[in-house]
Each structure stands twice: as structure tokens, then as C-alpha cells.
Amino acid sequence: MTTPVVQAEHLSKSFPVTRGLLRRTVAELYAVNDVSFEIYPGETLCVVGESGCGKSTLGRLVLRLLRPSTGRLLIEGEDVTDLPAEQMRRFRRRVQMVFQDPYASLNPRLAAGEIVTEPLENYEHLSKATRRKRAADLLSRVGLRPELMDRWPFEFSGGQRQRLGIARALSLQPALIVADEPVSALDVSVQAQVLNLMLDLQETLGVAYLFISHDLGVVEHIGHRIAVMYLGRIVELADRDALFSSPQHPYSEALLHAAPVPDPRLRRTRPVIEGETPSLFDPPSGCAFHPRCPYAVATCKAEVPALQRIADGRLVACHLRH
């Protein structure tokens, strides 16, 4: 059995809520609550959900930019949950990131070649000639001409800058790339080019992706498995085709029905979802989705549903699915 690149076991992350002059802690806000999953080599796990559901916090936990409050995080089979920063160094080259904003995530004081090889300076002592050769290889790999390596970030378009960001992430030959909304700031036509590039790189290099997005069209194009999050918890985790053909959690169903479709005649009857997303400061009892769920029963209000495997193999956190 292949060892997962990343294995999360019951990860939670809480932040203290303080009040008063003395900033006393009066509550704990759980941005991520009891989340478990695995990502295997060459696989893309997409995380979707509304803004504020905990997607980006989960990405930071996997990168170990945040330390989990509870649970375990394993990178290539080794437990890194409580490793101090200095011991995390050898793992950081195995997990890299592509940021959302291609304009703010590149250092304007560095030329393109220096940007994509900057991570190498932290791990490898290379001559200038070797770095330039590596920069040329990386630029070619992401579809940019090597002679552009001496240009500055402001001379590139948004799509080209995101290609630079991808090249920088690839420079250390990581096993996993965390991509947090990597195409949301790009034009639709450029989005397709960047997504196809990521798919080609995955096929060639075998890199795994944790792909965070709110765009279901993007997720359907690039994902192998989809994790749907609501108020800090995963409510459904399924293969892409299974989720898009027959969502089993009411929230997954609502998300898919809310997505725009090219032909309005193809839209099915939308389930009635009332109210606003509850606050993390005062989450509902039982299932967090029950105040908005058209199928809720008394049990939903009293008990938190466990994420359980149902008949077709997917994981669903719903009392009405067995």
C-alpha cells in the first residue's frame, strides 16, 4: 500500500476569543474541527465550501504554518504534529504552496530567475551558473521562455506570474503542493491554461495537490476526490464523479445546485436552503447545518453526526445517510 504524502487524523484548530481590558479568554473558536483525510502521490484532493468554512486554515495546518490544537499530522509517514520549527526544516521542502494572488506573492525586487530559484538557496549551495540553468529548466517546465528569467515581475501578466509561482513551488521537487485558490484572480481563459499546466505537471512529476477552491467548475476539472467543508468540518468526502452525479449530504446538494450552468433548462429543482451561515462564535448544537437543512429531524438538532462510510464507499456526516 502506498504511503500517503499527507495524513491528517482528527485535526482541529481553535483560536481564543478574548474580551475585556485584561483580554481574558471567554471562548474557543474552532476554525477546523475534527478533520481527517489522506492524500496519496499523484492525487488531487479538492477542498470546497463557503467563505469562512475553514479551508485556508486547513491548508495552513497541512503546511504546519499553524500548529494543530488537537489531532495528528503525518508527512510521508512521519508525525510532524509537534515538531519544533527547526526540525520542520527537512519536511518543508516536501510541501510547498501556490498562493492565490499572483501579484502580491512575488518579490518585486527579484528577477524571474531569482524568484524561482530562491527556495534552493535555503537548501542547496549552488553556483550562479547552476542556478541560472535550473531557472531556465523551471521556466521551460511551466511554459515560459528561459530568456525571460532576467525580467521583473511587473513585466509579466497575471497568468505568467502564477506560472512563476508554480515554478518556484516545483524548484524543491515537493511531494505535495498546497494551492489556495490559485486561479481565482485570473481571467477564465487563463484559468484553464493554468489548470491544464498543473494537470500536466502532476502527470509528469507525480506531485500531489491539496487544492482549495470555492469554484465547483474548477474543482470538477482538476480534482480526483472532493472534501466538502461546512463550519470547520468535512461533511462529505467522495470521488469527483460520485459527488457531482449524486451528492449525499444536503449541503453538498445545495452547493451543486447553486453553481451556474450554461443552459438554464438543465438546472434541476433547487432544494430550499434558508437562513445565513451560522457564526463560529456561536455554532448550532448537533449538526451545524440543521438550521438550514430542509431534511432536518430531531436527531440532527441533538447529535453531531460522525463522518461515516456509506454503501458506495464515500464518507458522509449525516444522520439520514447510512
Image (cartoon, helix red, strand yellow):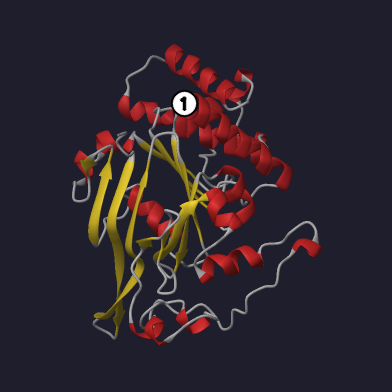
Quadrant housing the N terminus: top left
Q: Residue 102's x, y, as percent?
A: 58, 44
In which quarter of the view is residue 258 placed?
bottom right
The answer to whether 110 is drawn above or below residue 21 in the figure is above
Of helix, strand and loop, which one carries label 1?
helix
Residue 294 picture location, percent across and down: 55, 81
Which amino acid type corresponds to the residue marked 1 in the rendered image? Leu
Residue position marked by numbered label 1 in the rendering = 205
In the rendered image, the vertical position of residue 16 relative to residue 10, given as above or below: below
x%, y% of residue 14? 30, 68
User: Residue at horizontal 51%, vertical 64%?
Assistant: 248
Q: Going by the image, does 89 lie left or right of 94?
A: left
Residue lying farthest to the top in this orientation: 129
Instruction: Name which residue lies at 59% across and 66% down.
Output: 255
* Residue 160 placement: quadrant: top right
Between 142 and 116, the one nearer to me in the picture: 142
Residue drawn at the location 65% of the way across and 42% of the way down: 158
Q: Nearer the viewer, residue 192 or 303?
A: 303
In this view, which residue lies farthest toward the front?
311
User: Is the residue 253 above or below the residue 111 in the image?
Assistant: below
Q: Quadrant of the C terminus?
A: bottom left
Name the residue at 54% across, 39% down.
108
